[in-house]
Amino acid sequence: MLRKSGQALVVVLLFALCAGCKPASQADPAAQARQKIDSAEKVLLARLEAASKAAQPAAQDDQQLNQVLALAQQYQYYRADYPNDTATPRYMLKEAEIFYNYLRDPEMAGRLFDDLAAKYPQARQRPAALFFLANTQHDLGDTTAAQATLRKLMADYPGSAPANMAQQLSAYIRMGKVPEASVAP
């Protein structure tokens, strides 16, 4: 009798413990959001690659534009919902790149690059954000701010690849031109 009641107790405890269990995708909404973003990135990348092989300008396709806007919005929602997640700076950089390269909105891209650099000083994306911020500032005609941002990048990350690129961009700005390689990827 004691053995049967002990087994019943174990079964009841297992059910009680598992009643609160959720699949991993339900237990972590941030993981769900990252998975949704990763999927959207893959779909968009495949679509852009197909368009480039067909020699169609990607920016002229309304469906692609809608996908790009939807992806930028997903990055924005992720940033708002999970500001302290380690993926947030990466998504923020990608969102800024969408605004700079695809949507041709350097003002919005600049705000995002600047926010990333300010809000995530330890993020590994910060040097790239500073470099692209300087490039954007220069594109918008603010060479003084661009040079200040480049100096900050070189001081904060001496000897790094972004600092070396910043040094080159700074020299080109002083000469009054910008190399093609300084455009955000």
Image (cartoon, rainbow, N blue to C red):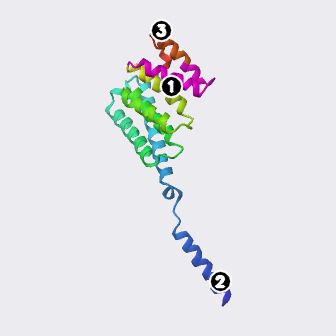
- Which residue is located at x 40 percent, y 39 percent? 71
Span colored in magenta: 141-166
Mark 1 Cα-neighbour bin, 10 Å: few <14, some 14–19, many ≥20:
many
| Numbered disc 2: secondary structure | helix
Mark positioned earlier in the residue sequence (1 or 3): 1
Q: Is residue 165 magenta?
A: yes
Give how far across and how far down residue 1 sits, in percent: 66, 90
Whether residue 19 sits left or right of residue 57 in the image: it is: right
Callouts 2 and 1 close, C-beta under 8 Å = no
Instruction: Name which residue type carries label 2.
Output: Gly
Quick check: 117 left or right of 66? right
| Closest to the observer, 15 or 104 | 104
Say what amino acid the circle numbered 3 marks. Answer: Met
Inspect this view and state whether residue 185 appears.
Answer: no
- Residue lying farthest right? 3
Vertical placement of residue 60 versus 170, above or below: below
Quote the CA–CA distance across marks 3 and 2: 83 Å
Residue identifier under label 1: 131
Eye-nearest disc, 2 or 1: 1
Q: Position of residue 116 (x, y in %)?
A: 47, 36
Q: Position of residue 27 (x, y in %)?
A: 51, 58
Q: Where residue 131 sits: x, y (%)?
A: 50, 25
| First in residue order: circle 2 vs circle 1 | 2
Residue type highlighted by circle 1: Phe
| Residue furthest out toward the bottom | 1
Asked which quadrant contains residue 14, the reply is bottom right
Residue 175 numbered tag: 3
The residue to which callout 2 is attached is 6
Q: Main secondary structure of the magenta part?
A: helix
Residue 173 visible, this orientation: yes
Q: Nearer the viewer, residue 113 or 19?
A: 113
